[in-house]
Image (tube, helix red, strand yellow):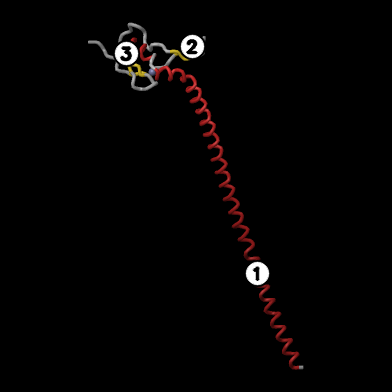
Amino acid sequence: MAIVNNTIELYEPQFCIETSRWVDKIPFERYSRNKPTYRCPCNYTFTSKTNQAWETHFNTKTHKLWISHYGGDKIIIKEKDAEIKQLRIRIGEMEKIKIDLEKKNLELQNKLSQLIGCIYPIVRTQEEKALKEHSDSVNNIEKLNLICLNM
Ligand SMILES: [Zn+2]
């Protein structure tokens, strides 16, 4: 009994160094046995194990358009990946700055509370002193008024 290969692999074209272009190549050796099924990413519906079907598929409009953009798409994806990586690093840096600022804010709030704690009794004492002085002045004026009236 022959073992059937049920695996499905994604087709990938080959890069031609001479022309700097991606070119189609049938994904398996001719006459090879027990080969996997390949799926083409150009439309995700085409799968085949036969050379002839792949040769026909390579000439379809959808596939030709896909391979003409293949390298470019790969470069764009790499650029986007690099951009995403940079943005993630930046987010990490900003989160660190945010944590530092929150820590400083808390320290400043504690210092402010301490200052208020020190200043408040002084202000209260001064206020009481001023009220007493005012009251004394009023009493003195009343005494003077009485003295003047009795003269
Ligand atoms: Zn295709």
Q: CA distance from mark 2 to mark 3?
A: 24 Å
Q: Does residue 13 sit above or below 146 in this rendering?
A: above
Please identify the residue farthest to the right as the structure is shown.
Answer: 151
Classify mark 2: helix, strand or loop: strand
Q: Position of residue 70 (x, y in %)?
A: 46, 20
Secondary structure of the residue carrying numbered label 3: loop
Residue 142 locus on image (x, y percent): 70, 85
Mark 1 vs mark 2: in front: 2
Quarter of the image with the N terminus is top left
Secondary structure beneath dot 1 equals helix
Residue 125 tag number: 1
For the residue pair 83 and 58, the one nearer the viewer reads as: 58
**Which amino acid does the dot numbered 1 rest on?**
Thr
Q: How many marks?
A: 3
Q: Furthest residue to the left?
A: 1
**Amino acid at circle 2:** Cys
Is residue 90 depicted above or below 7 in this figure? below
Q: CA distance from mark 1 to mark 2?
A: 90 Å
- Check the image and name the residue furthest to the front: 61
Separation of residues labelled 1 and 3 (CA atoms): 96 Å
Circle 1 Cα neighbour tier, 10 Å, few/some/many (<14 / 14–19 / ≥20): few
The residue carrying mark 2 is 16
Residue shown at the point (32%, 6%) measured from the top left: 31
Report the residue marked by disc 3.
49
Q: What's the residue at 47%, 20% (across, down)?
A: 69
- Give the percent coordinates (x, y) of residue 132: 67, 76
Q: Nearer the viewer, residue 70 or 140?
A: 70
